[in-house]
Image: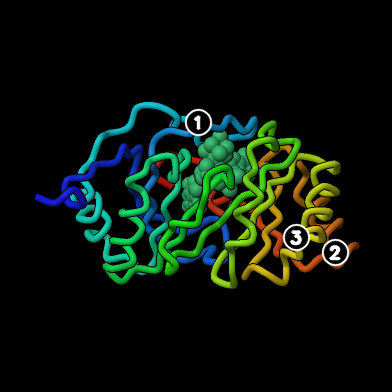
Amino acid sequence: MTTELSSTLRITEIFHSLQGESRTIGLPTVFVRLTGCPLRCQYCDSAYAFNGGESMPLEHILQQVGAYRPRYVCVTGGEPLAQPGCLRLLRQLCDAGYQVSLETSGAMDVSAVDPRVSRVVDLKTPGSAEVGRNLYSNIALLGPQDQVKFVLCNRADYDWARFKLDEYGLAEQVGEVLFSPSHAELDARELADWIVADNLPVRFQLQLHKYLWNDQPGH
Ligand SMILES: C[S@@+](CC[C@H](N)C(=O)[O-])C[C@H]1O[C@@H](n2cnc3c(N)ncnc32)[C@H](O)[C@@H]1O
Ligand SMILES: Nc1nc2[nH]cc(C(=O)O)c2c(=O)[nH]1
Ligand code: SF4
Ligand SMILES: [Mg+2]
């Protein structure tokens, strides 16, 4: 058996839902949530993925995903890139013909991710409590298929994000720049009003699944 076939990953959950975030919001998507994260964002809604999980061979993961016959697959976590086997998982999901996205904290190098994957890279804001973990060298690697996301906790985060938008010319470089309120922390309408007032070249986002399913497991 080759190394590739024998590789395993720690998995918290695999489920089928509507994509609640990013450019493909609203589309039926299979989610693969990898266990473990080296960050501790104060707002994290997925802390249940920090520990535990199940060690699964790659072939088993691919089988479970395939059973849903998905068009879209989202690899998330935890921090998926914290497990080296994630790169293989992403490549094999692309080889299987799915449209694959990767949700990542921006703290890990994204250069080795299969170019067919849409990388959704968070820039962690001061309000997240993890701003010091941003790997800014990732930004130059991103292109039109990729997305940069800011999850905003307060007005100071918004001003910081506007500055980064300008500093890195993000709107010109990546396919989508997403501004999302930290759920139940920053008033969504306030954020919407700021974006309109400043006419920013960004897409406002709410986490759709929280409105539909109130964060129940498996959604
Ligand atoms: C749970 S994280 C997993 C992937 C990766 N660790 C990351 O941070 O991008 C998936 C996405 O959910 C966002 N998120 C987590 N908690 C949130 C909250 N309370 N409100 C809004 N977005 C949140 C993260 O910022 C990230 O964009
Ligand atoms: N429905 C749904 N959409 C999502 N998009 C990104 C998610 C994530 O946790 O990364 C997520 C999630 O947990 N649920
Ligand atoms: S990086 Fe992602 S999974 Fe890790 S604590 Fe932050 S939001 Fe949660
Ligand atoms: Mg989530």
Task: Report helix, strand or loop for mark 3.
Answer: loop
Comes first in the chain, label 3 or label 1:
1
Provide the residue designation for mark 1. 47
Image coords of residue 78 (percent x, y) = 46, 38
- Quadrant of residue 12 in the image? top left
The outermost residue toward the top is 51
Image coords of residue 173 (percent x, y) = 67, 69
- Number of other residues with Cα within 10 Å of mark 2, as a class: few under 14, some 14 to 19, many 20 or more: few
Residue at position x 42%, y 69% from top?
Answer: 116
The answer to whether residue 92 shows anywhere in this view is: yes
| Amino acid at pointer 2 | Val
**Which callout, 3 or 2, points to the residue nearer the camera?**
3
Comes first in the chain, label 2 or label 1:
1
Provide the residue designation for mark 3. 168
Asked if the beta carbon under badge 1 is closer than 8 A to the nearest atom of ligand 3, the reply is: yes
Provide the residue designation for mark 2. 196
Labelled disc at residue 129: none
Q: Could you say which is closer to the camera, residue 18 or residue 211?
A: 18
Q: Are marks 2 and 1 in contact (CB under 8 Å)?
A: no
Q: Could you say which is closer to the camera, residue 202 or residue 134?
A: 134
Residue at position x 54%, y 63% from top?
Answer: 25
Q: Could you say which is closer to the camera, residue 195 or residue 156?
A: 156
Residue at position x 44%, y 67% from top?
Answer: 115
Image coords of residue 95 (percent x, y) = 28, 68
Residue at position x 50%, y 36% from top?
Answer: 46
Is 200 on the left-hand or right-hand side of 125? right
| Amino acid at pointer 3 | Tyr
Image coords of residue 42 (percent x, y) = 64, 30
What distance separates the C-alpha of mark 2 from that of mark 1?
Answer: 32 Å
Task: Report helix, strand or loop for mark 2.
Answer: helix
